[in-house]
Amino acid sequence: MPHIVIEYSENLDGEIKGAGLTKLLHKTVVDSGLFSPDAVKARSVFYSDYVLHADAESFIQSADG
């Protein structure tokens, strides 16, 4: 069962939601035909408390399992 997890910094929240990224990734995996639609799970979560290197203002990370 694929689980799509998108983690990102709070300052990207509007862009992630506005782009419908979670739904888009879910649909892409379902449309691949490799998995039953009921088996595919997708979620995204933003973090407001994080530390990055000096030049970075935001982050996005995705992992599947």
Image (spheres, helix red, strand yellow):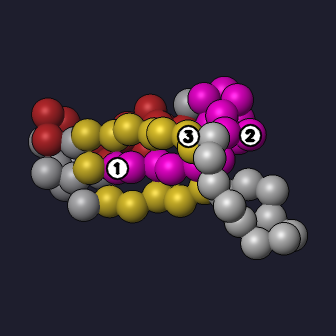
Q: The residue under label 2 is which amino acid type?
A: Asn
What residue is at 38 percent from the left and 38 percent from the top?
43
50 left or right of 43 in image: right
- Mark 2 lies on residue: 11
- Mark 3 lies on residue: 46
What residue is at 14 percent from the left and 41 percent from the top?
39
* Residue 30 circle label: none
What residue is at 53 percent from the left and 59 percent from the top?
61
When the figure is inspected, residue 46 is found, relative to residue 62, above or below; the finding is above
Mark 1 neighbour density, 10 Å: few (under 14) some (14–19) many (20 or more): some
Q: Nearer the viewer, residue 7 or 50?
A: 50
Q: The residue under label 1 is which amino acid type?
A: Ile
Query: Mark 3 or mark 1: which is in front?
Result: 3
42 left or right of 19 in image: left
Tell me where residue 30 appears, x and y as whole percent: 28, 42
Magenta stretch holds residue 28: no
Q: Are marks 3 and 1 in contact (CB under 8 Å)?
A: no
Mark 3 neighbour density, 10 Å: few (under 14) some (14–19) many (20 or more): some
Q: The residue under label 3 is which amino acid type?
A: Phe
Give the magenta range.
Answer: 4-18
* Residue 28 visible at all: no
Spatial CA distance of label 3 from label 2 is: 9 Å
State which tag comes first along the sequence, 2 or 1. 1
Query: Mark 2 or mark 1: which is in front?
Result: 2
Mark 3: secondary structure: strand
What residue is at 14 percent from the left and 51 percent from the top?
1
- Mark 1 lies on residue: 4
